[in-house]
């Protein structure tokens, strides 16, 4: 496990960065917190989640491990501008929901004497800000480490240790391309569906009639527009392809319905039921 | 409230009929339970949810109120074959998820000396059978009464009382056409989406990576194929139209993505967020 002597900096004290700080502080790690929002920094200090912090990027100079909890484009800009402060040998990780573009961007700019290990904690909420920080969202969630050939065993071990300290349910490794394709389907497409369902007509007069299924399906339609636009744009080809496949599937269903093809409808129901059951077993 | 002297028959002791029996018995009503599955009848008797029961349709002859908890086509067949046993003046209701076709079918066949008042308890689970009977699913749910010009005040009051006894969250009235259009969007379309997402590709290898959003969105993809095929077929035009509108919305999103139209994507996110918020407030 990561030595308690190591200093860990978290850059970005929002919902996710704040929750990381809370969880790592609880495990007695020495944390440095950096955010342009000094209220978030004060909040973290007051609760003893960080031992030092502020809005000054040079605070990272004391860190052996740096966790970036920033939007993907902000992460790239921040590194470009402030990597001069990185301690030589520092291990850097992130929380970003897409990987190919982030890794490409970092490869072009990152100093040779530090190591970046990509991580994706698949946890979140429909609210923003450190005041909602909550480590319980990690416990049922997957933590995906996305190594490349440039990574060392130590880099991967640091990312793994962070996931363990934060009590993630499963820790798995994926290559960047597979990760982004998977995320395009499992996470991004589901958000497109929820958003499109809310947008397909002005349904707000139906609020008195709705059932659990509609609520469950559209929970994620409350969406951080800046963050998700970035994530979608950086995974555009995968996501557009997933939308194609999904639209094809729904039009296939519609055709069975329009043709009163009862046997085909039942076949589609049985197939979806069988597949969905697998997702319960390993919950 | 319905007099305790009235006898209530429940035809169909599945998940929903069983839950009705449980809730009405708890409120000390005298219940008759009818099902072709004698094990379900025995189960209900053992727990004192019914005072008499069996597979003999003529058992309804003692009932002042009859609740049909059957699939829509089975309901129509059952009434056709067994309405000779109805007590004159009996008030009959149902639990069916579509209304126009059921009302049309019943209007053609139903005896003149009994009254049918259509009801739709918007509650359910992804399991079947009386052994899963559970009245707690009624408490957050809507109960929709769907009167026509043929209904009396007494008929509507009986349906309302049943909803009150079972502790439904809200009780509202809708005309049959509006009901079926609403259900086509709020309930049927959401099921088509969940099923199509599971069917859009063999995604079962992704079970280790999935997050809450995928699980929430596909929970209802475990579906009773016989029941839902009937429901969909009886609401075909409405549902097909809702699929059209939804596909148009998702293709509109895809176009914004493909064109890197960031402003339009943000606009769609903000709109969906605003609309979805309303569904939280009145939860």
Image (cartoon, coloured by chain):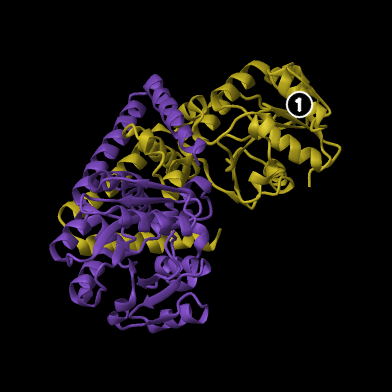
Chain colours: A yellow, B purple
Rendered view: B104 above or below A69:
below
Rendered view: A231 above or below A278:
above
- Give the x, y percent position of residue A204: 38, 33
Which class describes the residues within 10 Å of circle 1: few (<14), some (14-19), or many (20+)?
A: some
Which residue is more in the foreground, A14 or A113? A14
Rendered view: B61 above or below B68:
below
Outermost residue on the left side: it is B108
Q: Can residue B55 be seen in this view?
A: yes
Residue at x 29% of width, y 47% of height: B179
Residue at x 55% of width, y 61% of height: A282
- Give the x, y percent position of residue B245: 26, 37
Number of marks present in the image shown: 1
Residue at x 29% of width, y 51% of height: B146
Which residue is more in the foreground, B142 or A57? B142
- Give the x, y percent position of residue A51: 84, 28
Which residue is more in the foreground, A146 or A264? A264
Chain where mark 1 sits: A
Q: Is residue A181 left or right of residue B106?
A: right
Rendered view: A38 above or below B56:
above
Badge 1 is on which residue?
A43
Residue at x 56% of width, y 58% of height: A283
Q: Can residue B203 be seen in this view?
A: no
SS class, disc 1 = helix
Q: Is residue B113 left or right of residue A129?
A: left
- Give the x, y percent position of residue A141: 60, 48
């Amino acid at each position: 496990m990561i030595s308690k002597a190591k200093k860990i900096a978290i850059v970005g004290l929002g919902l996710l960065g704040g929750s990381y700080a809370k969880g790592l502080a609880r495990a007695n790690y020495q944390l440095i917190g950096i955010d342009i929002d000094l209220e978030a920094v004060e909040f973290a200090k007051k609760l003893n989640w960080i031992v030092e912090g502020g809005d000054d990027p040079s605070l990272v100079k004391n860190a052996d491990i740096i966790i970036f909890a920033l939007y993907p484009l902000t992460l790239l800009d921040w590194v470009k501008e402030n990597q001069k402060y990185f301690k030589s040998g520092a291990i850097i990780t992130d929380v970003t929901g897409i990987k190919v573009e982030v890794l490409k961007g970092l490869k072009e700019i990152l100093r040779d004497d530090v190591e970046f290990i990509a991580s994706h904690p698949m946890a979140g909420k429909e609210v923003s800000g450190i005041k909602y920080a909550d480590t319980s969202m990690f416990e049922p969630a997957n933590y995906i480490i996305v190594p490349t050939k440039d990574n060392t065993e130590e880099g991967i071990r640091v990312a793994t240790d962070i996931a363990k300290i934060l009590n993630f349910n499963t820790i798995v490794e994926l290559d960047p391309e597979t990760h982004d394709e998977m995320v395009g389907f499992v996470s991004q497409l589901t958000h497109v569906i929820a958003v499109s369902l809310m947008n397909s007509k002005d349904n707000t007069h139906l609020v008195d009639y709705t059932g659990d299924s509609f609520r469950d399906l559209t929970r994620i339609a409350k969406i951080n527009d800046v963050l998700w636009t970035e994530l979608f744009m950086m995974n555009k080809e995968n996501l557009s392809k997933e939308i194609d496949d999904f639209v094809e599937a729904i039009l296939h269903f519609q055709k069975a319905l329009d043709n009163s093809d009862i046997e085909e409808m039942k076949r589609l129901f049985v197939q979806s039921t069988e597949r969905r059951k697998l997702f319960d077993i390993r919950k």
